[in-house]
Amino acid sequence: MREFSQSVLSWFAEHGRKDLPWQENKTPYRIWVSEIMLQQTQVATVIPYYLRFMQSFPNIKVLANAPIEHVLNHWSGLGYYARARNLHKTSMCIEERYDGLFPLDFDILISMPGIGRSTAGAILALADNQRFAILDGNVRRVLARFHAVEGWPGKKKVENLLWDIALEHLPKNNLASYTQAMMDLGATICTRSKPKCSDCPLRRSCIAHDRSEEEIYPFRKKSSIKPHRILYLVMLICGGKVLLEERPPTGIWGGLCSLPELLEKNSLNQWCIEHLGYFPKNIHQRKGIHHAFSHYSLDMRPIEVRIDDSFSKVKLRSKELWHTINAPTEFGVAAPIEKLLKSIH
């Protein structure tokens, strides 16, 4: 087991990533934000979001006191928006309970919204060199291949086995470097497809490599057909403004602003009567957008409705608002919706 960690650390010393933004001026807060952003998102995508986020929210106090709309605006396009909501909730917990000092305690961290076992371990190892294992997607892949662990890692029995293995490989020292090394190894060498085994420091003892079965591990979940949904979006345009609505705080795009939704196209007539008092003539179906979520796919079909009346005469529901077309948004908007808004002329 000691040989494993030594090989990984030696590789990291020469090839590991040491110039990532969250590795500069390293603090528990900066590490925490990076770990949340990196959940299910690649480093290259995260970096510009992280830099902008840190500029606006340099510490826990600023983040805790910021409106959630401001936080979601900085997350727009990054996806998995529950991460941003949990980040905000946790910052408020830390500000209230710990005077804004980030707690370097495992039990406290895993009690916070959005922080699980692996994320807590990563924060403590990277920020404070504490001896905790991690098991993100990259590390899981490295360990599953090295030991040829059979079974889908989403099953509790397989996951528990991988946790045991991760703990056994932990070195006694250099936990921050080792943790970053394992993430880097999975992200740059032991990749999901076409792994660069010739550059891997573990190849001589890797069972999957020895069997030429790298592509088999980790086992994949048996594929199932994703449900498909069709959603109609009302694009009500009036006097250089477009109507938006704030979505519920939970669920897909929770807390973000979006175009008003209709489950059926036939509902447009009733929607217009409720908002306008009449059914306008200037209506046409615009080109739709297809978007794939993790558990279903969605066809968004915008219906453009243009009216000449003053927008002040439109009867707004709770959480509805007017947005000036082509103006910067000060609230969170999902990437597909932002694309639709930019298409308005």
Image (cartoon, rainbow, N blue to C red):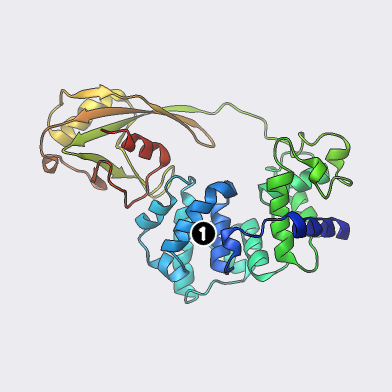
- Residue at (74, 51) in percent of width and height: 160
Decide: few, some or many residues near mark 1? Use Cα within 10 Å; few <14, some 14-19, many ≥20: some
Q: Position of residue 188 (x, y in %)?
A: 70, 46
Residue 108 falls in image quadrant:
bottom right
Residue 132 visible (yes or no): no
Name the residue furthest bottom.
99
Residue 284 visible (yes or no): yes
Instruction: Work out whether residue 25 or residue 68 is closer to the camera in this orientation and state it.
Output: 25
Residue 127 higher or lower than 255, as above or below: below
> The disc labelled 1 sits on which kind of residue?
Pro
Q: How many marks?
A: 1
In-image side of 96 versus 23 (left or right):
left
- Residue at (54, 64) in percent of width and height: 30
- Residue at (82, 50) in percent of width and height: 201
Q: Position of residue 183 (x, y in %)?
A: 69, 53
Q: Position of residue 116 (x, y in %)?
A: 60, 57
Instruction: Work out whether residue 85 or residue 58 is closer to the camera in this orientation and state it.
Output: 58
Q: Position of residue 332 (x, y in %)?
A: 37, 49
Local secondary structure at mark 1:
loop
Which of the image's four quarters has the C terminus?
top left
- Residue at (28, 33) in percent of width and height: 344
Instruction: Work out whether residue 166 or residue 215 is closer to the camera in this orientation and state it.
Output: 215
In-image side of 109 versus 94 (left or right):
right
Residue 37 higher or lower than 314, as above or below: below
Which of the image's four quarters has the N terminus?
bottom right
Instruction: Work out whether residue 248 or residue 140 is closer to the camera in this orientation and state it.
Output: 140
In-image side of 147 versus 339 (left or right):
right
In-image side of 135 versus 53 (left or right):
right
Mark 1, residue position = 113
